[in-house]
Image (cartoon, rainbow, N blue to C red):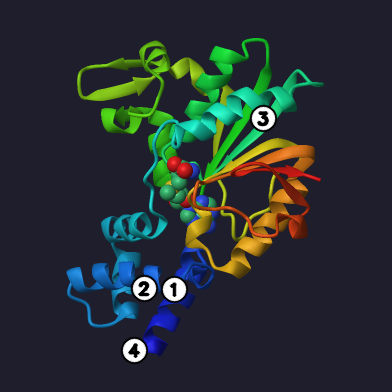
Amino acid sequence: MRDDYELMKKKVHQSLKLNLSLYKEAQMKRRITTLRDKHGFKSYVDYFTACQKDAKFLEEFTEKLTINVSEFYRNPNRWDVLRKKIIPELTKNKRKITIWSAACSTGEEPYSLAMMLEEYFPNLNYQIQATDFDQAVLNAAQQGNYQERSLKELPAALKKKYFTSNGTIFQVDPALRKYIRFERHNLLEDRYPKDVDLIVCRNVLIYFTDEAKNNIFHHFNKSLVKDGYLFVGSTEQIFHADQYGFYLEDSFFYRKQ
Ligand SMILES: C[S@@+](CC[C@H](N)C(=O)[O-])C[C@H]1O[C@@H](n2cnc3c(N)ncnc32)[C@H](O)[C@@H]1O
């Protein structure tokens, strides 16, 4: 029933501060329906009420909604462009940069950034703010334990230098944590950081409606310093980027005008 779904969305917004109307509906509804049916509920409202009473249900609900898949050096050729072109451009006239890894999931992206900067820009001073809506993924990011499959794109030298392993779990070097601040941030509700040199926001924009993306791009533009960069996922090119005050510098890299 349509009303039942709409009412559940209201309750989700009130209790989790997650506005499902700003996510593409078909995909979201399919995911929630799968969970509702799995637990044998007839209505969405009854199912979400059960989630509010049971921490395990709620964790599963949030996890299913927020889609946490990530990996180190996701789309490695884009990381090469970041290293060879974007970071050198950004640091032409400064020795310190601020990076925001937005929707960082379990931390693969901010740790990849820290490894890359340590390895190739040893004299650079930098701070990475790594945020996500989901506190559970941020807790995992702070632990820094990974399965080997999430390291498959990481250059071998970085894997060797920055991980220790017992054979199954790969633990990232805790020394990298001093460069990264993990924090909760909801891209749809919260205030955005200021004076950022580089925003890395990848593989979350695809889940949002055009209206939501529109707002996010305007906010990102305000967050960046002049000539700062936005790095998006490899299916997330921005059409008519100039309407948000960006121009395309390289595929999936946008520079603030
Ligand atoms: C597929 S992961 C992307 C991880 C990483 N950026 C990458 O590209 O590998 C999407 C992340 O977006 C987060 N997310 C979803 N909605 C969000 C919101 N409204 N605000 C902040 N993060 C959100 C999810 O919790 C999830 O961790």
For the C terminus, the image quarter is top right
**Residue 104, visible in the rendered structure:** yes
Left or right of 228? Residue 28 is left
Q: Secondary structure at mark 1?
A: helix
The amino acid sitting under disc 2 is Lys
User: Mark 1: few, some, or many residues within 10 Å (few <14, many ≥20)?
Assistant: some
Q: Where does label 1 land, which residue?
A: 25
The amino acid sitting under disc 3 is Ile
The CA span between labels 4 and 2 is 12 Å
**Labels 2, 3: front one:** 3
Q: Where does label 4 land, which residue?
A: 1
Q: Where does label 2 land, which residue?
A: 29
**Labels 4, 1: front one:** 1
The amino acid sitting under disc 4 is Met
Q: Which mark is residue 86?
A: 3
The CA span between labels 1 and 2 is 6 Å
